[in-house]
Structures are given as C-alpha cells and as structure tokens.
Image (cartoon, rainbow, N blue to C red):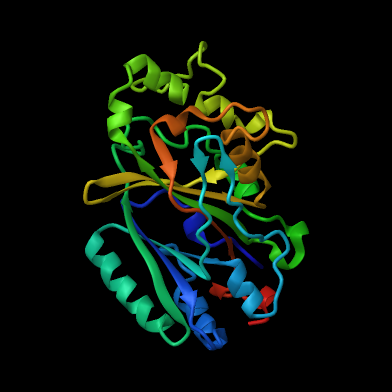
Amino acid sequence: MRTAQPGILAPLPPVARYLSYTLRAGADPRSTLQALAIACSGPDTVVGIGASLVAALNAQVPGLNAYPAFAAPGLESPSTPAALWLWLRGDDHGSLLHRHRALDALLAPAFEAQSTLDAFVHQGGRDLTGYEDGTENPQGDEAQAAAIAPESAGPLAGSSFVAVQQWQHSFGAFDAMSRTEQDHCIGRERESNEELDDAPESAHVKRTAQESFAPEAFVLRRSMPWVSGARAGLVFVAFGASLYPFEAQWRRMCGLDDGTPDALFRFTRPISGAYFWCPAVVGGKLDLAPLGV
C-alpha cells in the first residue's frame, strides 16, 4: 500500500533546513536515488523530485510541470527550478547539520548542492510580521485529501506535489504602515487572528480564500520563517494532490485574473519558486517506480 511521506502531514518541526540539488553533467542518478529512497522514508525528511530529473530519467509524472515565471505590474516572480529538493525536519540545528552532511555524501555521486536555507517556528506558528500563518489549513482527513493524491491516481496514489517559494520581507516598508494598514494587507487582526469584516479586496485572505475558486483550491501549507544575516522572510511550502490549487491562488494573488494584486506585495516579494513531486512510501522506502527506478 502506498502512503504519503510522513513528514508532509506531520506538525511543523521546531527547526528545518531546505536543500536543493542539480544533477551532475553526465551522471546516472538511479543508484543514488535508490539509496536516497531507503535513507529518507521517515518523518525527518521530505523528498521532492524536480521536472528536470524526471526528464533525465526519460520518465513522466503527469501533472508535474515547470514553475511559471509570472509577471504582473511591479512584480516579477522568478522560477528557480532544481532537480531534487529535501526538507530536513528536526529539533535542533546541530542534528540538521550532521544529517545534511550525511545526505551530501550520499548524493555526491550524482548531484551537486544548489542551495541551503534554514528555517524555524516563530511564536507558535506566526510569520515574522507577527501574523499567524496557515489559519485556514485543512485538518485531518481534509488535509489528507488536499495534500495527497488519492487511490484513483493509480501509480501516483499516496504521492504529493509541492510548491516552494522563498519570500523576503521588507520590514522597513511593513513598519512604515499603520497598524490598520498592516491588518488590511493580511485581512486579519494581528493579536486575535480574527478575520476583518471590512478587509479590502486586496487583502491576502480574500485573494487566497480556498473555497472561492471553482473548483475549490485547497492546499496544505507547511511554511516556516527564515533568517540569514539581516535578510529574513518566509519559506512558503504548499502541498497539494495536484498543482492546480496553488496555481489558482497564485494567479489571483498576482492580479492576473481580475487586476487586483495581493496587498502582501506592499512589503514582501518571492525571490525563488519551484515545483516538485513527492513520491509515496511503499514497504519502508520511497516509491520511485513511477520514475522507472
């Protein structure tokens, strides 16, 4: 029986590290991927496969496509693909460091490190601006239905698709706004997390109301704040049974549907964006059969 990678549905860990890799020129990744499938089937690591790696294996994952480099007035959303993405989950940074080192060694025959980003839980699940993140996340069976491909998906049953973006905040721009303006950007009152009745159409909660799309566009958010020197923001991670829900929300956020961009863009911007397919787990290891591995 295929099941989801357990780290997808598990609660957020105290700390995390996001790793991405490119495929070495001329390398055959099959044996390395087989080793990875055994090493990373537990709750401490989530593995995502990029479209370029699928293509290198002469395979197909229906529904996996390139991340769209959307452009809107005053906004560019970069596409930063990778062959392989790992979400390391843990309790302390030291353990993540040593797991990272071990995975680099395991992957070295076929993959080169592309990026590393550390993240953490802030104030019980709030963004660095102080607003609660993922309030409308589905729970229980609804989370499973939103994030994981059903049995009807055949060979992809139990797998998931994930959209990953690194957002960098401009705290100067955020601090320059009045408290009312800040609340109206999000559409919620910061302390109480109550949705505002008078929120403008540009408010983030209105741009991304998952039940307002046709069909509905539910995702399971697993986002975490990041800090690197004086730079900081949010690693947005959204798992879905397909990529449709994220793309529907993202188009509306960018104002591509109705000309109203999300008010978040007043103080934050995505500086990366990528899609990955997260294989299911079968028999205690990642199920790479859809890739012919």
Q: How many marks?
A: 0
2 sits to left or right of 108: right
Is residue 203 shown above or below 69? above
Q: Residue furthest front?
A: 73
**Residue found at the far top of this picture:** 198
**153 left or right of 82?**
right
Residue 282 visible in the shown view: no
Q: Nearer the viewer, residue 147 or 50?
A: 50
Q: Which x, y percent locates residue 168?
A: 37, 44
> Between 271 and 102, which is closer to the camera in this rendering?
271
Name the quarter where the N terminus is drawn: bottom right
Which residue does the image show at 71% across and 71% down from the upper left? Answer: 60
Q: Which residue is painted at 47% across and 32% down in the image? A: 135
Q: Position of residue 125 (x, y in %)?
A: 36, 39
Q: Is residue 203 left or right of residue 249?
A: left
User: Which residue is located at x 30 percent, y 76 percent?
Assistant: 101
* Residue 293 coordinates in the image, percent (x, y): 63, 82
User: Residue 122 at x, y = what percent?
Assistant: 30, 41
Residue plotted at (70% across, 76% down): 59
101 over 110 or under it: above or below = above
Whether residue 240 is visible here, answered yes or no, is yes
Q: Nearer the viewer, residue 142 or 234?
A: 234
